[in-house]
């Protein structure tokens, strides 16, 4: 089973700052199989990025994804107040899906 | 309105059973692969089970294999999860989600999620 490790666990930033979130896989992952989700308290996760770098419908262009192989990154270019949330990466492989443990982006 | 609505959660004793349902509306349910994903209180996301659009292909996480059964009724636009031999560690919010596969780009992802239903396993 591929394990996804996200870092940092918590990111403390101010609105307007840039956020860089990392997702590292225990073995190589096809870029097609890598997605990112945002989850706010009491809400279901929301798809942000699929195929490592494609934005889902309605997602602002301040969100971008990049990476390949074992290292993937979610970047939020300028944090808006509504972006403070928990972010998860997810991969598919061998008829199963796994998620990273999440990165919390909190207001500094 | 495109949505998924889960139901059937509640409090159950260890060793007990529960059946979750997920009602789909606003889209052609029979065209979509579906999954159940859970989240223990204060924890991260864990994929539980997947079913293809026809129901012919099914996958389970090792943690629930042999205890949980996923099924669907396309005529009723509904997805189900039969949970038997429940354990304390099965306590979680259970989400249903459409599981999208792009045959051109080979992308796999969960694009539409319900709001979840809470299952609590406790004596």
Image (cartoon, helix red, strand yellow):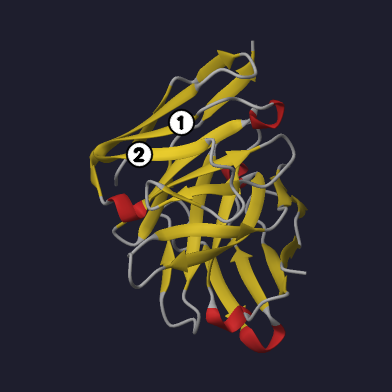
Characterize the local packing of mark 1: few (<14), some (14-19) or many (20 or more) Cα atoms within 10 angstroms: some
Left or right position of A84 against B105: right
Secondary structure type for disc 1: strand
Chain hosting mark 1: A
Q: Tell which of A22 and B37 is nearer to you.
A: A22
Q: Give how far across and how far down residue B7 sits, in percent.
A: 76, 62
Q: Residue at x 52, y 58 (%)?
A: B110
State the mark number for residue A66. Answer: 2
**Quarter of the image containing the C terminus of chain B?**
top right
Is residue B29 among what the camera can see? yes
Give residue B101's quadrant in the image. bottom left
Q: Tell which of B25 and A97 is nearer to you.
A: B25
Q: Are marks 1 and 2 in contact (CB under 8 Å)?
A: yes
Q: Give how far across and how far down residue B100 sits, in percent.
A: 48, 66
Asked if residue B11 is positioned above or below residue A108 in the image, the reply reads below
Left or right position of A83 against A36: right
Question: Residue beneath label 1, please?
Answer: A75
Q: How many numbered marks are there?
A: 2
Chain hosting mark 2: A
Secondary structure type for disc 2: strand
Per the model, the C-alpha gap separating discs 1 and 2 is 8 Å
Q: Residue at x 46, y 57 (%)?
A: B109
Q: Give how far across and how far down residue A6 sits, in percent.
A: 41, 29
Q: Give how far across and how far down residue A68 sits, in percent.
A: 26, 41
**Quarter of the image containing the N terminus of chain B?**
bottom right
């Amino acid at each position: 089973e591929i394990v996804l490790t996200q870092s940092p666990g918590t990111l403390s930033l101010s609105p307007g700052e840039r956020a860089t979130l990392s997702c590292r896989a225990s073995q190589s992952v096809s870029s097609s199989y890598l997605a990112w989700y945002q989850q706010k308290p009491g809400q279901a996760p929301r798809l942000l990025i699929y195929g490592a770098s494609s934005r889902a419908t309605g997602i602002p262009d301040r969100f971008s994804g990049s990476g390949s192989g074992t290292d993937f990154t979610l970047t939020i270019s300028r944090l808006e107040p509504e972006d403070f949330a928990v972010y998860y990466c997810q991969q598919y492989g061998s008829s199963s899906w796994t998620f990273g443990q999440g990165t919390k982006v909190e207001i500094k | 309105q495109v949505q998924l609505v889960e139901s059937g959660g509640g409090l159950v004793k260890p060793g007990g059973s529960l059946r979750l349902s997920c009602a789909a509306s606003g889209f052609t349910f029979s065209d979509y692969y579906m999954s159940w994903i859970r989240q223990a209180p204060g924890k991260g996301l864990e994929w539980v089970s997947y079913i293809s659009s026809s129901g012919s292909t099914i996958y389970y996480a090792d943690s629930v294999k042999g205890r949980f059964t996923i099924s669907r009724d396309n005529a009723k636009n509904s997805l189900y999860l039969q949970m038997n031999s429940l354990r304390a560690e099965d306590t979680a919010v259970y989400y249903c989600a459409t599981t999208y596969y792009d045959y051109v780009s080979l992308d796999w992802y969960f694009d539409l999620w319900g709001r979840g239903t809470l299952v609590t396993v406790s004596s």
